[in-house]
Image (spheres, helix red, strand yellow):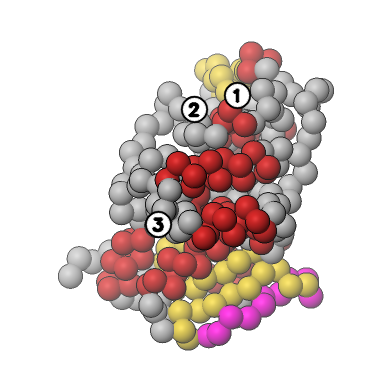
């Protein structure tokens, strides 16, 4: 048996199984949030439609062309929203928009000039998305102030970042980072680490994420068929329900209420408490 030199493994809103995650579960999420009509949702399901993600699998259904059309109709209805955080405020085009050339900044660190891009747009965060044509041409630039703060000399020193390290950007550009898809996804990682024994694992899910929905995560977690050690229950933060937790043998599954894909960004106190409790073996 391979020895893994890790104590714990935690993932937030991660794609894990292509059969359940991303587009396979977005219709359930949209309908659950009352964003698509029941007639559209029922027709989709009555035709046994399952939409693949970026061609990872063929479209399933009695009529693949009909399934594609129905799915596109759903996506058109939710296009004005933030797919990654369906309840997050969406800002209009205008003053909030910054062109890329206006967002390039330079900072001098250790006598060297470092260039970085302030903030990011939804399109830049997920350049692989196939539905970009539905997004408005002008998009809100998010987290520009964060980019400026992290690249200050004072913050880099506080974080002990060596001078030779490049300037920080919230999302690596497509040109700098290459990836490949694995047909089997990453569910196998959980299974291998469980077999290794003694490795804590947690998967937490912001429950308003429309791209990697909680509903899909529930399906692949169920497929693991792990014994339930602690039944589904709410967990609390500051005397408020912050989400729900189910503890399985070898895996804690936790939802974070009212936030999407970037739960640590939009529910900072709650997720900080969650991670701290989990690391210290305290009750979540």
> Would you name the residue on which mark 1 appears?
117
Whole-number angstrom distance, CA of label 2 to CA of label 3: 28 Å
In the foreground, 282 or 127: 127
From the image, tell me which residue sits under label 3: 19
Left or right of residue 266: residue 19: left
Label 1: which secondary element = strand
Q: Mark 2 — residue?
A: 173
Name which residue lies at 52% across and 59% down: 45
Q: Which mark is residue 244?
A: none
Query: Looking at the image, is 218 positioned above or below residue 88?
Result: below
* 50 up-or-down from 250: above or below: above
For this rendering, which residue is in front, 83 or 276? 83
Q: Earlier in the sequence, mark 1 or mark 2?
A: 1
User: Nearer the observer, disc 2 or disc 3?
Assistant: 3
Q: Quadrant of the N terminus?
A: bottom left
Crowding at dot 2, Cα within 10 Å, few <14 / some 14-19 / many 20+, comes out as some
Q: State the image quarter where residue 150 is shown.
A: top right
């Amino acid at each position: 048996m391979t020895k893994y030199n890790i104590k714990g493994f935690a993932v937030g809103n991660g794609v894990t199984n292509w059969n359940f995650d991303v587009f396979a579960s977005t219709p359930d999420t949209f309908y659950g949030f009352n964003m698509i009509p029941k007639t559209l949702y029922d027709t989709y399901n009555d035709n046994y439609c399952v939409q693949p993600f970026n061609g990872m699998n063929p479209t399933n259904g009695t009529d693949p062309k009909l399934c594609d059309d129905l799915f596109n109709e759903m996506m058109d209805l939710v296009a004005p929203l933030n797919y990654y955080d369906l309840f997050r405020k969406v800002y209009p085009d205008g003053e909030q928009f910054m062109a890329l050339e206006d967002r390039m900044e330079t900072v001098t660190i250790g006598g060297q000039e470092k260039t970085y891009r302030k903030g990011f747009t939804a399109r830049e965060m997920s350049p692989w998305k196939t539905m970009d044509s539905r997004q408005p041409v002008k998009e809100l630039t998010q987290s520009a102030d964060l980019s400026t703060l992290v690249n200050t000399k004072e913050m880099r020193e506080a974080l002990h970042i060596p001078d030779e390290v490049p300037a920080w950007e919230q999302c690596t550009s497509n040109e700098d980072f290459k990836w490949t898809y694995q047909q089997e996804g990453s569910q196998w990682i959980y299974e291998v680490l469980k077999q290794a024994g003694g490795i804590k694992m947690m998967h937490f899910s912001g429950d308003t994420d429309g791209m990697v929905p909680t509903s899909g995560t529930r399906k692949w977690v169920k497929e693991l068929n792990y014994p339930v050690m602690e039944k589904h229950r709410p967990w609390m933060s500051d005397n408020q329900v912050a989400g729900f937790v189910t503890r399985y043998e070898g895996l804690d599954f936790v939802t974070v209420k009212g936030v999407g894909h970037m739960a640590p960004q939009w529910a900072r106190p709650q997720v900080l408490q969650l991670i701290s409790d989990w690391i210290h073996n305290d009750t979540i």
